[in-house]
Amino acid sequence: TGLNPQQDRMLEIGAVRVCEGDIRDHFQVLICPHRELSETVVSLTGITQQMADQGCEEIDAFRDFLDFAGELPLLGHNLMADYRFLKQAAKNHGMDFERKGIDTWKIARKILKEPEKKSLDVLCRFFEISLQGHHRALDDARACAELFLCLRKKFQEQEPGLFVAKP
């Protein structure tokens, strides 16, 4: 519902499982935030108030996500933005949450001179990766996974340490 995990709430979790360079499975769930969505959020995500109100409870979504992800590292574009929300959800429910992760935004900033802007949508256009429902969790997760695979294929030999999950 916003960018501050202490004040705002998760609205959706989307994830894909990447195995041996292929997307093998996916996870998506809407979460009822128990608050009114701003017009900005509705416009940005396409998630309506009615859709959000029919979402599941945060604890159920978080547990289902943990079951899906297991102990695998997380991958994201500007990963800490999402990680802080997952960490806050764990804290809200008396749980621990620690994962290693890989951030495609950090990788892109380190190895790419072009394009100047390193947002997910710009990089997807640059590498001709389909990004259909930008700012929907599952679509962003798929695009991020494809971006990671593309960057790894092109740059892993030059910068192998960038493609390894870190705390």
Image: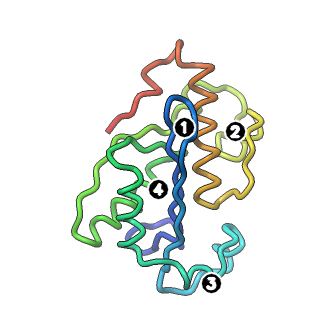
Q: Please state which amino acid type lies under the numbered disc 1.
A: Thr
Q: Please state which amino acid type lies under the numbered disc 2.
A: Leu
Residue hosting label 3: 49
Rounded to the nearest whole Å, what is the CA distance between mark 1 and mark 2? 10 Å
Task: Give x and y (percent) for residue 24.
Answer: 55, 42
Binning the other alpha carbons within 10 Å of mark 2 as few (below 14), some (14 to 19) or many (20 upward) gives: many
Binning the other alpha carbons within 10 Å of mark 3 as few (below 14), some (14 to 19) or many (20 upward) gives: some
Closer to the N terminus: mark 1 or mark 2?
Answer: 1
Q: Nearer the viewer, mark 4 or mark 3?
A: 3
Task: Give x and y (percent) for residue 123.
Answer: 69, 38
Rounded to the nearest whole Å, what is the CA distance between mark 1 and mark 4? 13 Å
Closer to the N terminus: mark 3 or mark 1?
Answer: 3
Q: Is residue 127 left or right of residue 25?
A: right
Residue hosting label 2: 123
Residue hosting label 1: 104
Binning the other alpha carbons within 10 Å of mark 4 as few (below 14), some (14 to 19) or many (20 upward) gives: some
Closer to the N terminus: mark 1 or mark 4?
Answer: 4
Secondary structure of the residue carrying numbered label 2: helix
Secondary structure of the residue carrying numbered label 4: helix
Residue hosting label 4: 82
Task: Give x and y (percent) for residue 44.
Answer: 69, 67
Marks 1 & 2, CB-CB < 8 Å contact: yes
Secondary structure of the residue carrying numbered label 1: helix
Closer to the N terminus: mark 2 or mark 3?
Answer: 3
Q: Please state which amino acid type lies under the numbered disc 3.
A: Gln
